[in-house]
Amino acid sequence: MIWCNKVGKEVFTLQDTVGGIVAACPSLSRIFEELGIDFCCGGKFSLEQACARKGVDPVAVVERLNVTRSQPPSVDGFGAAHMSLTELSEHIVLTHHGYLKSELPRLEATANKVATVHGGEDPRLFEVHQVVMTLANELHGHMMKEEQILFPMIGLLESGHGGTGHYCGTIRNPIRQMEHEHDHTGGALAALRELTEGHVPPDWACNTYRVLLDTLSRVETDLHMHIHKENNILFPRAIELEDRRLR
Ligand SMILES: [Fe+2]
Ligand SMILES: [Fe+2]
């Protein structure tokens, strides 16, 4: 089964151009970045030629590309109902905070590059870059507060060593603050969606521009799942546990 939406053929071959591969499946740009293969200006080279220029094994690369594209997107059904609050917090940090920490710098750099090169054609790209920078900055601070304050409080509460005597008072206070910040994040994601007309590239968009929109779309999807797990699962369960302890 092929998971890249725009792929019109079964598998990539050594004769496919690097640019064509990224245009069909933008997430594969990560592999080219890792190998140092230029998929934007050097996009006209065939995969075989591009690998030869970099001195890497083309057969191994085409195999990797085809395996990666066939992997399903991480549909995170995950068994939250069977997780302790501590396990759930650890899962969120590992899965979603880890994802953002690796992806946000890449997103910022790509937004900067696209605004610099194409902002003259579409000034909204400067705004996209600005919103991305602000969002990234706020998310780094937000994750730090969860990892250093709220999640440890939840862990202490679950182990029976925390509760209303904590310096933050009831756990409802930091949760309320995190939910407020989530609302702010949701607003930024909506703004980015509007500025990019639903993450849809214009006809003239280069591959870097397409990668930016693809990354924005993936970050949005992951953040929606991330915030859902916190707002709708972790936080209510933590409040319920604290309430039980107070009875
Ligand atoms: Fe989080
Ligand atoms: Fe959060």
Image: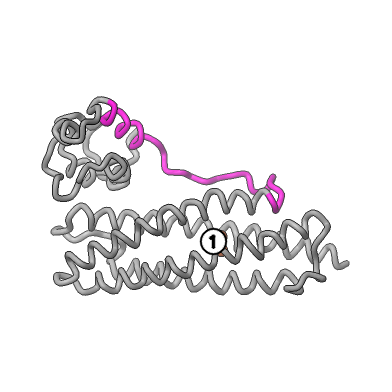
Q: Which residue is mark 1?
A: 227
The residue depicted at 18 percent of the width and 50 percent of the height is 40
Nearer to us in this view, 107 or 247: 107
Residue 160's spot in the image, x, y percent?
A: 83, 57
Q: In the image, what residue type sits under mark 1?
A: Ile
Q: Is residue 11 left or right of residue 121?
A: right
Name above or below for residue 147 compared with residue 35. below
Q: Which quarter of the figure is the N terminus placed in?
A: top left
Q: Residues within 10 Å of mark 1 (few under 14, many from 20)?
A: many
Q: Residue furthest top?
A: 59
The residue stretch that appears in magenta:
60-86
Name above or below for residue 151 compared with residue 51. below
The residue depicted at 29 percent of the width and 58 percent of the height is 213
Res 168 quadrant in image: bottom right
- Ligand 1's image quarter is bottom right
Ligand 2: does it lie within 8 Å of the C-beta at label 1?
yes
Name above or below for residue 131 compared with residue 144. below
Res 148 quadrant in image: bottom right
Residue 170's spot in the image, x, y percent?
A: 75, 72
Q: Is residue 38 left or right of residue 4?
A: left
The residue depicted at 20 percent of the width and 46 percent of the height is 39
